[in-house]
Amino acid sequence: MKQKSLLMGLTAVAVVSDAMLLPFYPQFFAARFGMHDPQHVGAYVAAMCLVVMFALPLWVRVVRHLPLLQLLVFTQLAAGLLCLYCYWTSSLAGFWLVSLAMIACKGSYLLVYPQLMALAGEGEHTATVGLLSVIVHFGGIVGALLGGLLLQGVDGGQVFLLMAAGDAIQIGICLYLLWRQPLPLPHAANLAPQAADDGERLASVYRLGALMLLFYFSAYLVRAFFALHWQAVSGIGDSRLAAAVFALPALLALGGLWHNRRRALRGLVPLGSLPAMLLLGCAGLLLQALPDTAALLAGRCLFGWALFQLTVQLDVQLFRLGTPASYAADYSKINFCQNLGVLAASYAAGLLVAGQGLASPFLVAAGGLVLTALLYPLLAVTRPRTVPA
């Protein structure tokens, strides 16, 4: 459907914009503001997560009174203007304030995710989640490569000009859909939960949220300082190569999508249970902690495969719990737990690197995945909630 394709394209543009500086914040703050403290970088990324955590529920409330596409036009326009300020400013305090406001506006695009799941049939959920996961991973590739190119001998502030261009593209997609779409998109107000007896479903959502929190903490703990770790292990200082290695999991995600679809055509579920994938991801993290380039690359691949399978399995569990009427509200709760895990990981990464070195986040993250596997039997949702007709 053209509508779904354009919404996925909008998501891809947003992800690319978000990913451009993600692996390079240590280098960006050092080059732009002379700030070399890793704890400062961890605090900034944590602040980004905190802003998204509290902005998304606000946008959920707003779209009860304003259609989602109209909201996105206004929020992405504001984000683009704030990006231009981030490009011009030389004040560290001003950059913090304005860039966090920009991130709050950009975060409204996350509501496209439950919107897409509401448009998809129940039998299409796994395929849709897998495709969105690949979009996120490849958005990470493109964004990281663009960020690496701009940071390699060029003023890193130009990243914000590309971000502003991405916001303009998103505005164009929304205006096109508002102008030419023959059928209106489902209004987000219709995605509010309607059942009175939601206790069982909400309990399942919160248990899944606890798993998501620990999983995202472990997965994101290794992101902020990965480029520096790779450069230290390999002895290669090229930011473009660091960006390519950082984005390796995206290639594994594409392979995972192809593999899962082939199994689905034969009526089979994805290979490997969730606990098994958690342990595979743990092995990948431990390999990345070793001071050996080949081991790091092998571990990056194992971790990428496990990360894709885990993301798909966990997200599909969420959308099996309710109906399109509850998707946005449930996703908002899960997103809060995810970002809480990312926030904790961002702050912890700075502390770990400052105190224990660049390899320490990989060891702690591996322990986090083991703990997630141990807790899974207690917190897992064994079957979806039966919704009365």
Image (cartoon, grey):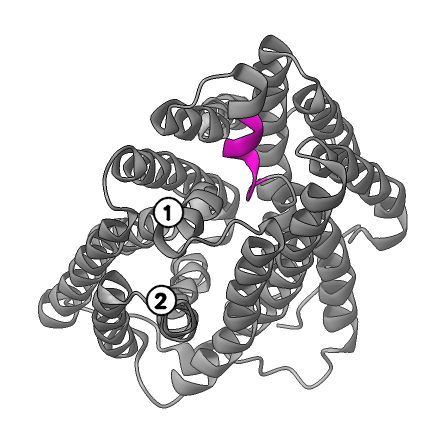
Image location of residue 201, percent across then percent down: 73, 69
Kind of residue sitting beneath label 2: Lys
Residue drawn at (26%, 39%) of the image: 150
Report the residue marked by disc 1: 31
Our reading of the magenta stretch's main secondary structure is: helix
Residue positioned 43% across, 73% down in the render: 93
Q: Residue 225: say if magenta.
A: yes
Q: Which part of the image, by quadrant, shows the C terminus? A: bottom right
Q: Residues within 10 Å of mark 1 (few under 14, many from 20)?
A: some
Sort mark 2 into few (<14), some (14-19) or many (20+) by Cα contacts within 10 Å. many
Residue range of the region highlighted in magenta in the rendering: 223-230
Circle 2 SS class: helix
Let me know if residue 193 is in the magenta part. Answer: no
Residue linked to disc 2: 106
At which x and y percent is residue 70?
A: 24, 78
Residues marked 2 and 1 touching at CB (< 8 Å): no
Give left or right: position of 169 versus 13: left
Per the model, the C-alpha gap separating discs 2 and 1 is 25 Å
As drawn, is 51 to the left or to the right of 322?
left
Q: Position of residue 220 (x, y in %)?
A: 61, 45
**Residue 13, image x, y percentages:** 27, 50
Whether residue 372 is visible: yes
> Which residue: 73% across, 72% down?
202
**Tag 1's secondary structure?**
helix
Q: Nearer the viewer, mark 2 or mark 1?
A: 1
Q: Amino acid at mark 1?
A: Ala
N-term mark: 2 or 1: 1
Front residue of 51/225: it is: 225
Query: Height in image: 336 above or below 134?
Result: below
